[in-house]
Image (cartoon, rainbow, N blue to C red):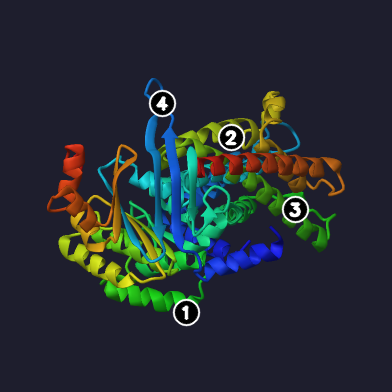
Amino acid sequence: MKFRRIFAIVKMEMIRQLIDPLVLIFTTLLVPVLILIFGLILGDSYGWGPDYTIFEHMLPGFIAYAGLLTIYDVAAGVAGERETGIQKRLSTTPLRTSEYILSQMISYTIKPIIQLILGLGIAVAVGYRPLIFFGDAYNVGQKLLGCLLVIVFMVVFTFSSVGFGLITASFSKTANAAGGLAFIFIVPQQLFGSFIPPYIFGIDPIGWAMPSWYAARGMGLIFGGTPFSFWEIWVRLGVILAFSILIYGLGIFLFERKKRR
Amino acid sequence: MLESEKENDSKSKSNLTYVKSIEVKYLKKHFKGKRSMPDVKAVDGISFQINKGEVFGLLGTNGAGKTTTINILTGVLLPSEGTATVAEYNVEKEMKKIKELISVCPQEPAIYKFLTGLGNIKFFGDMYLLPKEQIIERAERLLEILGLFEARNRLAGGYSGGMKRQLSLIISLINEPEILFLDEPTVGMDPRNRRKVWDFLKEQKNEKNTIILTTHYIEEAEALCDRVAILDYGKIIAMGSPQELITEHKVKNLEEVFMKITGRSILEGIA
């Protein structure tokens, strides 16, 4: 594995995103703006139970949603490269599939992390006080560990989305088709595992099949101040990791198969 | 084979000790027909060999099997039947080694529109892990020769069709490949730039480098190629030096050779 190649692709992907600032701003700010709107409207509403506001129920799902949108970015980006012949050209260079995939993972994880930071910042600004960061029972070390764990959840979850993106791209002939097809993986995860928590409507078991459910519920536990020793946090992280490896493996297999037939 | 022998073998090949740059035997590539459509025999049992230092042309109409042949030799496609070796490495089993020695200028420009011309060249130079200074030095030289130096810092998306093709050609030369595949390299270029590319490719000809060129421009094949293979419906219908073929068929040029054998013009179906 040659890191120079990986770095070159990551740099190229960053330029691709920066070349159209309007699109970049829109796609990066979508989730933070949703958080702002819902935070202002539902920040004081307890319609879904006495312990948390509706916004507090929704917030982890909004953050997971940022990782979910990566499916679209990866699918459209990879299919677009195939459409223009760049994939074919790259496949004739010494670039390895593992290097290409790793560079995609890195490139497409940066934006969701920025969205996570922006989204949490806005949530705090509109009055959200996650216990892990604001509770008196936690020292600085525990707060930092909480931060780190949330980022780990986001990164591992985004990896599964990159895998879904590669699967989508392997079935699509054009970037437009890939963009449309991506919603097959986005919408169910959005409905049953993101900002509309399925447990509120008694349909939680449907969410168990969605990586986003584990990401949102895992981050929810951390925000809620659940001790890090609590098994459920680690089981949820483990399940997303297993999902990611499985989806990723399938994504790479289909990508390779499409690359050389 | 022992590891040390493999290593020696690899070293010897990188030292250009192989004689046959490419050897193709009974190569076939069939694509399954979709729905009720019949299977397509894109390449149908072709055999040829290309010696080191040769410029070899694959000549034919659209759909003759030229690009499919190149795609098999460069690892984009797997053959359905037959064997092919590049620098004596098998294309099915030893593609990693082949990729270190070759470069491809594909039919479509295949460049990043959001990178500058120089940015594209540097990116592909990084794929070959070339030293940074070497990339810059080679890039500037090639940009100068092909007349793109002034436009090197402009976004490639703003280039004209001909400039994109020239940039694509420069990218394919950045690693100074031992074996260079050019798939219709001058399509879309105006006659002046086409002539410039031909002159440049003629300068590239030497005993170490092998060039495989697909084209449907007769003048291009006659000007550049030591030998050509004329393909039609996936089969080689004639092979030899342009002069040999012209003499053998008692005609004036390769276009007439093609016409005499197939009864059609080589430019048929080309817009």
Is A233 displayed left or right of B180 in the figure? right
CA distance separating discs 2 and 4: 35 Å
Q: Earlier in the sequence, mark 2 or mark 3?
A: 3
Q: Is residue B40 above or below residue B162?
A: above
Q: Nearer the viewer, residue B99 or A135?
A: B99
Would you call the spot at circle 3 few (<14 residues within 10 Å), some (14-19), or many (20 or more)?
Answer: some
Residue B133: mark in rendering: 1
| Relative image position of residue B38 (x, y in whole percent) | 38, 24
Which residue type does callout 4 highlight?
A: Lys
Q: Residues within 10 Å of mark 2 (few under 14, many from 20)?
A: many
Q: Nearer the viewer, residue A62 or B240?
A: B240
Looking at the rendered structure, the kind of residue marked 1 is: Glu
Image location of residue B118, percent across then percent down: 38, 70
Q: Chain of mark 4?
A: B
Residue B129 screen position, x and y as percent:
53, 69
- Marks 4, 3: nearer the viewer: 4
- Closest to the camera, between mark 1 and mark 4, is 4
Q: CA distance from mark 1 to mark 4?
A: 49 Å
- The amino acid marked with disc number 2 is Gln
Q: Which residue lies under the disc numbered 2?
A: A190
Decide if residue A39 is on the left or right side of residue B243.
right
Q: From the image, tell me which residue sits under label 3.
A: A149
Between the C-alphas of marks 2 and 3, the distance is 22 Å
**Badge count:** 4
Q: Mark 3: which amino acid?
A: Leu
The one of B49 and B43 positioned closer to us in this rendering: B49
Which of the 4 image quadrants contains residue A188? top right
